[in-house]
Image (spheres, grey):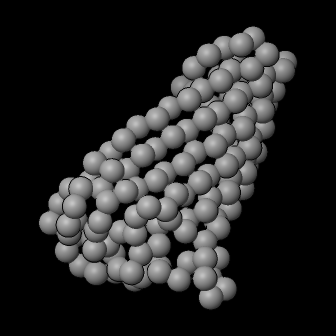
Amino acid sequence: MYDAGVAKLSAATGTIKSEGPNVTAPIDNKLALYAVTVPFGANRVIAQYGSHAANGTSASYNTGLKSKTTGLAFERDLSKRTFVYVRYEKTDLAAFSAKSYVVNGAAITSSANWGTAGIDSQRTITTVGLSHAF
């Protein structure tokens, strides 16, 4: 994290290697997250972008696609340890579509049609809440 005074900049990256009985070749998952927090008085505005990309071959995982998440939040301090917030997040799940999924050795429902045939691969979440640190 870098504090530029008027804004705080954050960046994180990572790699996870998936191996197992249903993975015909190791899958390299590449993760990235970038965020900007702009404080003003008792308020904060936070914007973020994250992505997940997987490369490899698996019977239960389409690879080579990227899932992206963008988010925007507003937070207002009520006291030193309590704040209220409203957050909005949009995620494109098309990268997680697959012909089949295998979880604990059992096949589960396919999502191969996400993003096609009128099936939306977008997920949006809006939250409103109160946070208190004990």
Q: Nearer the viewer, residue 57 or 35?
A: 57
- State which quadrant residue 45 falls in: top right
Residue at 29% across / 65% down in the picture? 57
Residue at 84% across / 18% down in the picture? 41
Q: Quadrant of the C terminus?
A: top right
Q: Quadrant of the N terminus?
A: top right
Give residue 68's position: percent from left, percent from top. 59, 54
Q: Nearer the viewer, residue 94 or 102?
A: 94
Q: Furthest residue to the top?
A: 5
Give residue 76's position: percent from left, percent from top. 79, 30
Q: Is residue 103 above or below residue 67?
A: below
How many marks overall? 0
Q: Is residue 97 above or below residue 133?
A: below
- State which quadrant residue 67 falls in: bottom right
Give residue 51's position: percent from left, percent from top. 54, 48
Does 104 sit left or right of 50 as displayed?
left
Q: Furthest residue to the left?
A: 21
Q: Furthest residue to the right?
A: 41
Residue at 24% across / 56% down in the picture? 26
Q: Is residue 83 above or below residue 17?
A: above
Residue at 22% across / 61% down in the picture? 25
